[in-house]
Image (tube, helix red, strand yellow):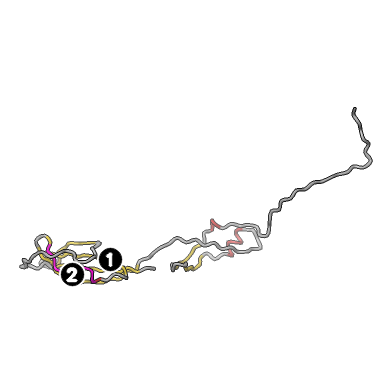
Amino acid sequence: MKKRIIMLLCTAVLALGFTMAPAMASGGPFYPIKVDEYTYGPLDELRISKVYQLSLSDDPSGIPTEDFERGGRRYYLLDMIKEDEIGVDTQDYTDTITVDSDTNDLSKILKQLDPHRDVTTEDGHTGLLALDYTSVKVEAKGYKTNTRSLSATRTYPNLSEVNHS
């Protein structure tokens, strides 16, 4: 199972009365995966919420936190919220099991098999395998094929020889 971290950067609260030079909107190597503009509170303050998705190895200090100007209004960082999000990484997996049985009756053999089995793969995936009943095959064990040439000679004694000339 792999983990991902989502950094939620809430930039906002319109700073009324500021008329400073425009700031750069993004100073780091990270770019938001989602940006929402909305109003908040009884004064309908304009706010912008930016969501960044980082891996566990990423340093969140690369997320831009500087003030910026947009649409003639100046915005500053109100707060930054970190949310751990656990994701699921899936992988198809097939395992073959061979079982000896005293019968070739498929219904009796199916009763001998576990319907579910816990598994851990070499690359660290874990899960529960379900038996695919349609894939069960019954084969005889211990038989082999042998090929050889055979010849037979028969003798019939006491027969007279007939000569057709």
Which residue is painted at 19% across and 72% down in the image? 79
Three-letter code, disc 2: Thr
> Where does label 1 land, which residue?
53
Residue extending furthest toward the top = 165
Q: SS at mark 1? A: strand
- Left or right of 97 on screen, residue 31: left
Q: Give the percent coordinates (x, y) of residue 102.
A: 66, 63
Q: Distance from label 1 to label 2 (Cα)?
A: 15 Å
Which residue is painted at 54% across and 61% down in the image? 96
Q: Give the percent coordinates (x, y) of residue 15.
A: 9, 68
Q: State the extent of the magenta-drawn residues as a range.
A: 61-69
Q: Quadrant of the C terminus?
A: top right
Which residue is painted at 66% across and 59% down in the image? 141
- Left or right of 105 on screen, residue 70: left
Look at the picture and state if 49 lies above or below 153: below
Three-letter code, disc 1: Gln
Q: SS at mark 2? A: loop
Residue extending furthest toward the front = 165
For disc 1, the neighbor class at 10 Å (few under 14, some 14 to 19, many from 20) is: some
Q: Give the percent coordinates (x, y) of residue 12.
A: 15, 67
Q: Quadrant of the N terminus?
A: bottom left
Q: Give the percent coordinates (x, y) of residue 135.
A: 54, 56
The answer to which quarter of the image holds residue 10 is bottom left
